[in-house]
Amino acid sequence: MSFTATKFAPSPLPLSSTTPRSNDKPLSFSFDHSKANPSSSSFLGSTRKLLRFRAPAKPRSSSPVAAVLLQQTSNLLITKEEGLELYEDMILGRFFEDKCAEMYYRGKMFGFVHLYNGQEAVSTGFIKLLKKEDYVVSTYRDHVHALSKGVSSRAVMSELFGKATGCCRGQGGSMHMFSKEHNMLGGFAFIGEGIPVATGAAFSSKYRREVLNQADADQVTLAFFGDGTCNNGQFYECLNMAALWKLPIVFVVENNLWAIGMSHLRATSDPQIWKKGPAFGMPGVHVDGMDVLKVREVAKEAIGRARRGEGPTLVECETYRFRGHSLADPDELRDPAEKEYYAARDPITALKQYLAENNLASEQELKAIEKKIDEILDDAVEFADNSPLPPRSQLLENVFADPKGFGIGPDGKYRCEDPKFTEGTAQV
């Protein structure tokens, strides 16, 4: 079996105003997953330079006008509408996380809050290609995945504030964003625990389509997780099951090079995560996760394969988080030079530059989007701040399917039958 996708080789230099993005072109490759060919991909680790891209020669044209038109159109990977959608989604994710940091330090949020700054190209590049019916399973760094899937800023912010108007009624908090309406199947606090849930969702889609003959059951599941998870047993078990049953799932590794304070290069015997896909009989692809257009091209093929019934794909997106592991992390372990290098490759700056260089958006249009997002987030904070706290009795909900599971009290009766218990005021 062969896997054909669009793979991009990024420039070895940090993106800047002097780095021409318009010269980046897709490299077409065919991947035979009966054997892993090291030359078909390269790990873009923090100790290695990015692959140097050499663009193919431009076709000659006898007409100068035709040559200009060819140059203007042949390199475009997106339309104006698509570009503005991607930019708005990435700005929403970045500005939302910045607002979270502000609210956290103001004492509006509690517990651990893990921000997504720097990784927006992965969420936007994948999730904006999904249908509403498709599934997303996230990690503890889940705010932006929920936003990209369509969960409102109000619902996510209220959840972070622990309010009853949150997407989990204030009971989930930062690490457990869930929305049945949007098929956002949750963030998960422990690494790896979301992957079996995602595998089950993909199995459900396949079962409903092939056994129950539901023609519209063509949902694809995206399972997001980090590099640290790829040394976890559940990851390998689910790769095996997904490949064995050809499940409609894409395993998306957000390799930000650090598992809390442990360098990926120190913790993994072979840091090239994508190679684990062919070991289980599925394609493994590596992509520059700091470039939304490159991520999007790989995502198109992987999601398309899953929807066509061709089975799972493992995609390693090399990215970088611009903040510490959480807002409680002083971020003292990473080399400042490494952080500066990746900050210079900001995925939002790169997309903005691409849109400008290809006349897909004006500065005024992009500023209008940023102003719109600012207003949305100001509204979300005000809404969350004014929302009510959950009642104490809500703590007893969604614990046991049968409320008798709370057991028998000192009086010999089921605790759930005590009126004070259901009001949340009984002595337990």
Image: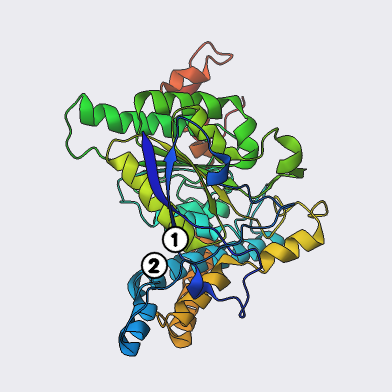
Q: Residues within 10 Å of mark 2 (few under 14, many from 20)?
A: some
Q: Does residue 42 lie above or below 410 as drawn?
A: below
Q: Is residue 281 left or right of residue 209?
A: right
N-terminal-most mark, 2 or 1: 1
Check if mark 2's residue and mark 1's residue have beta carbons within 8 Å: yes
| Rendered image: mark on residue 124 | none
User: Which one is nearer the viewer's eye here, 199 or 105?
Assistant: 199
Tell me where residue 214 appears, x and y as whole percent: 18, 33
The residue tagged 1 is: 26
Q: Does residue 423 lie above or below 88 as drawn?
A: above
**Dot 1 amino acid type:** Pro
Quadrant of the rendering where the N terminus is positioned: top left
Q: Where on the picture, by quarter, is residue 216? A: top left
- Secondary structure under the numbered disc 2 in the rendered image: loop
| Rendered image: mark on residue 77 | 2
Which residue is at a point 70% across and 50% down the rendered structure image?
Answer: 325
Which residue is at a point 48% across and 18% down the rendered structure image?
Answer: 405
Number of marks in the rendered image? 2
**Dot 2 amino acid type:** Leu
Quadrant of the rendering where the C terminus is positioned: top right
Tell me where residue 53 appears, x and y as whole percent: 56, 63
Q: Where on the picture, by quarter, is residue 34? A: top left
